[in-house]
Amino acid sequence: MRTGGRSERVVASVLEAARAELASVGYVALRLEDVAARAGVAKTTIYRRWATKAELVHAALHEAGHYDDPLPDTGSLRKDMLVMLEHAMDLVSTPEGRAVARMVTIEGSNPEVDALCRSLKEESRRHRAGLVVRAQERGLIPDGVDAPLVTDSVFTLVLSRLVRFGERVDRPTCERLVDLVVTGAENGGGQRPRPTRASAHPKRSKTRR
């Protein structure tokens, strides 16, 4: 049984090669000709689909992050967050994850790298916040709670410790942290700011006639 056409296999091979090169040499030193050689394709094959190195690396890391995958659904927001948190820590510990850590901590002063990291960060935030949005749709979390703030409170703390210091937070600590944050959200904590009257009804400037 076929699992995909030649085009899909070529794309998968190139993205895998890009991640391998990124893990090996970092973003700044990565060259598309080396990615092509590792993937066993012509350089023009890469340019036909990804116009720049940034586009290729973004696609490779987006796939590695599984941002298009379905969210875990255990029926419990706490358990779903723990499943995703464990997966995120596993991912950061891979060669690709360490490559991203290098981009953030060492190569982040490069404007191209900074823009790429910001884009990936926003994609991951939206994906994780989907857990809270779904809980809100099910009536488990009040509608006014800031969904990205809830997930950021857990993931930023845990993953920054792993990225910057190489310290993986143990399971019991993760459970206590998730419970603390989710309990607060269930009780209406972390509400999105409400627009003030001035911002909701901006004054119109008067023009002289």
Image (cartoon, rainbow, N blue to C red):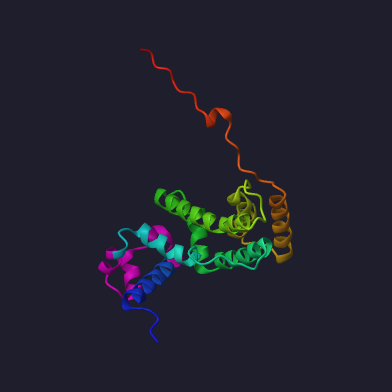
Q: Mainly helix, strand or loop, the magenta region?
A: helix
Residue furthest out toward the top: 209
Whole-percent x, y for residue 176 in the image: 74, 59
Q: Quadrant of residue 29?
A: bottom left
Q: Quadrant of the N terminus?
A: bottom left
**Nearer the observer, 82 or 88:** 82
Residue at image point 45% right, 50% down: 114
Find the magenta span and give its range: 23-48
Whole-percent x, y for residue 9 in the image: 36, 76
Q: Quadrant of residue 209?
A: top left
Q: Is residue 101 left or right of residue 111?
A: right
Residue furthest out toward the bottom: 1
Answer above or below: position of 95 versus 137.
Answer: below
Q: Is residue 38 magenta?
A: yes
Q: Quadrant of residue 84?
A: bottom right
Whole-percent x, y for residue 22 in the image: 43, 64
